């Protein structure tokens, strides 16, 4: 098998890619800015145009101390966010004060063929201090397929309400062959006090 190489040895100086190499581009489709918002929903532009969508969370701040940041999918243009899911989640935690660290599987936050909202923070709850927020991303694959289930993967980092950094990995699938055409984000209680969520198509 032939080795595909770029046109020179320095990554910063590459001006073209060799035959057979393609570059992916993120196409910004929508930006939603929360301001004491109960939910943030994306109900358009999720269609067969792209086979992968990326949602980026930027400084998502909770109005309440202790809720979970979460999401769900819709197959009816946002009338209902109740897609059946099977998911998995694990996390790592490190406290500000240098105390005990944690690493583990969060069996209380996964879903086994349930329709509820999926948590995007593992093993802990969001903090509401003025300087606390959550960041991360969610990848949704081929949502318009009417053949396959709808896989997703997410990673977040959150300053949780016990003043710790929580790095969470979440993955799973929506167990439906119906097209997914809307996504909603919210906290399990209270509002999204502030923050930005951007939706991209991967070209």
Image (cartoon, rainbow, N blue to C red):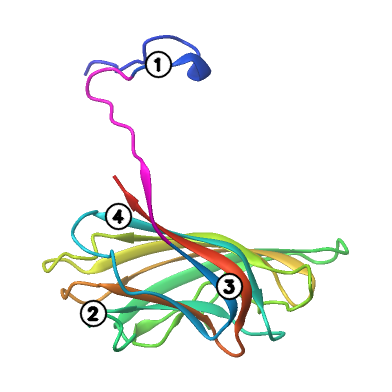
The image position of residue 131, as x and y in percent, is 78, 67
Sequence-wise first label, 3 or 2? 2
Secondary structure of residue under mark 2: loop
Of pointers 1 and 4, the one earlier in the residue sequence: 1
Relative to 54, residue 73 above or below: below
- The reply to whether dot 1 and dot 3 touch (C-beta < 8 Å) is no
Reading the image, the residue beneath label 3 is 122
Give me the C-alpha separation between circle 1 and circle 4: 26 Å
The quadrant in which the N terminus is found is top left
Region rendered in magenta: 17-30
- Callout in the foreground (1, 3): 1
Residue 129 falls within the magenta-colored stretch? no
In the displayed structure, 160 sits above or below 26; it is below
136 horizontally vs 178: left or right: right
Q: Nearer the viewer, mark 3 or mark 2?
A: 2
Residue that mark 4 sits on: 52
Quote the CA–CA distance across marks 1 and 3.
41 Å
Q: Which residue does the image show at 63% across and 85% down from the upper left?
A: 67
The CA span between labels 3 and 2 is 26 Å
Q: Name the residue under label 2.
A: 75
| Image mark for residue 15 | 1
Nearest the eye: 199 or 74: 199
Whole-number angstrom distance, CA of label 1 to CA of label 2? 42 Å
Q: Mark 4 or mark 3: which comes first in sequence?
A: 4
Q: Is residue 79 left or right of residue 129?
A: left
């Amino acid at each position: 098998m032939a080795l595909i190489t770029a046109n020179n040895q320095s990554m910063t100086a590459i001006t073209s890619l060799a035959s057979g190499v393609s570059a992916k581009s993120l196409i910004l489709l929508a930006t939603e800015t929360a301001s004491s918002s109960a939910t943030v929903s994306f109900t358009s532009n999720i269609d067969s145009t792209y086979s992968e969508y990326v949602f980026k969370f930027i400084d998502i701040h909770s109005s309440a101390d202790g809720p979970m940041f979460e999401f769900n999918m819709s197959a009816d243009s946002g009338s209902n966010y109740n897609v059946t899911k099977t998911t998995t989640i694990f996390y790592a935690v490190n406290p500000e004060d240098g105390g005990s660290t944690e690493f583990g599987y969060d069996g209380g936050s996964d879903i086994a063929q349930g329709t509820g909202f999926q948590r995007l923070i593992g093993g802990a709850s969001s903090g509401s201090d003025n300087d606390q927020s959550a960041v991360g991303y969610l990848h949704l694959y081929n949502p318009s397929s009417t053949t396959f289930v709808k896989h997703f993967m997410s990673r977040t980092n959150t300053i949780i309400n016990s003043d710790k950094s929580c790095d969470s990995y979440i993955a799973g699938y929506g167990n439906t062959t119906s097209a997914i055409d809307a996504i909603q984000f919210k906290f399990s209680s209270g509002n999204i006090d502030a923050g930005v969520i951007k939706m991209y198509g991967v070209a």
